[in-house]
Amino acid sequence: MPFGTIADVTPPPPPPPPATAAEPPPAPGGLRRPRGSVLADRAYATGAGVAALLAVVFVGYLLWTTIANTGETWSAFGIWGFISGTTWDPNDAIYGALPFIYGTLMTSAIALLIAVPASIGIALATVVFLPRRLRGPVGGFINLLAAVPSVIFGLWGVTVLVPLLRPFLDWLSETLGWVTIFGWKPFEGPVTAGSYLISGLVLAIMILPIITAITREVLLTVPRDQREAAFALGATRWEMVRHSMLPWARSGIVGASALGLGRAVGETIAIVMLLGNTPGIFTPLVGPGSTLASVIAMQTGEASGLQLSSLTALAVVLFIIAFVINAAARLLVRRSEAGTSGGLFRRGG
């Protein structure tokens, strides 16, 4: 500092006071959010949190009250004894859940094996292959199937599908009845009106709209540049679908399949009409059976005591199966998104 001059010792301005909860910090440019907007945001966040908490509490309360009514069953047979039991006889007060677990998983597996490839094909058709003027009508028709009541599907299956497929099932039983898989003969007769194959086919039609709609929306999210890049490299339309679109959409397809499987596991009315009420394990696919949901619906009205407790225990088993399906689906989706799993489709070389 030169001799004889006075330095500028003006103190810096004090920092602005910190924003309080009642007064949010001003927006850039000196603008302030209206107080009503701030209160609305807080009310929305609080309401959303309360709604989420109530949903969790309700599910927990539902499960707890259901389990509370199963004590008589666990005391009589034990948890493993009830789940692995193969006999359901109300006359002798013997109750086992395994035949109904088998029927539920078998019909759902058949439905999924039919519905997933069909849904992927329909979704690809409405996104890639069909002319633009047909994509909307075809997609709309598939979505309309979701609005058809279950009892209509069941009635259609009984009056149309069973007589139509009966000759084919007879031929299947006569031709492949000798096939044995670890002692199980899946096509051995006699062929009955109610069967796993027809029930699974109707279930596949019922879950088709769910899987198709979600798969279609996921395929539409594939970047246009990615599709055009595949064409620029000389790929055919199918090669573009296989190497560009399906790997992109596989996590969504897994999630869609899980939703469809959850619908199939819990279906009741159509299964009651098409599968019958003949519980069994490793019974032929051309014969009758029973599921968890169908036996609960058919016997709850006249049940009491140990039988009602056992039916409630079946409901707990069904709840656990649905929970496991959703948990497994979430795991598969995360692995697919992270690229640590092959998923439904592998990227081609």
Image (cartoon, rainbow, N blue to C red):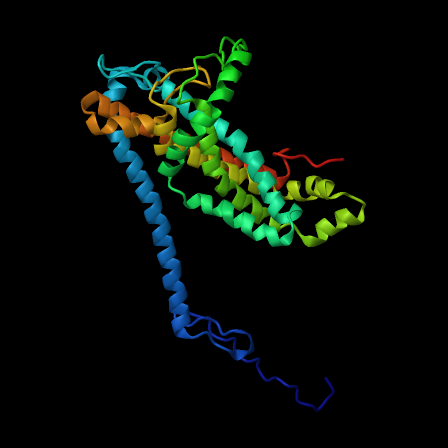
Left or right, residue 84 beside residue 337: left
What's the residue at 45%, 32% (across, down)?
Answer: 202
Q: Residue 338's quadrant in the figure?
A: top right
Residue 244 visible somewhere in the drawing = yes
> Where in the figure is residue 1, as x and y percent of width and height?
72, 84
* Count of marks overlaid on the render: 0
Left or right, residue 39 beside residue 185: left
Q: Residue 295's quadrant in the figure?
A: top left
In the rendered view, tell whether residue 296 sits above or below residue 17: above
What's the residue at 42%, 36% (across, down)?
Answer: 263
In the rendered view, tell whether residue 195 sits above or below residue 246: above
Foreground pick, 309 / 143:
143
Left or right, residue 187 beside residue 75: right
> Where in the figure is residue 42, as x and y percent of width and height?
39, 63
Foreground pick, 153 / 59:
153
> Where in the figure is residue 290, as x and y percent of width and height?
36, 22
Left or right, residue 24 beside residue 305: right
Could you tell me which quadrant the C terminus lies in?
top right
Residue 268 visible somewhere in the drawing = no
Foreground pick, 281 / 18:
281
Q: Residue 157's quadrant in the figure?
A: top left
In the rendered view, tell whether residue 101 sits above or below residue 7: above
What's the residue at 49%, 36% (across, down)?
Answer: 258
> Where in the figure is residue 190, as x and y percent of width and height?
43, 13
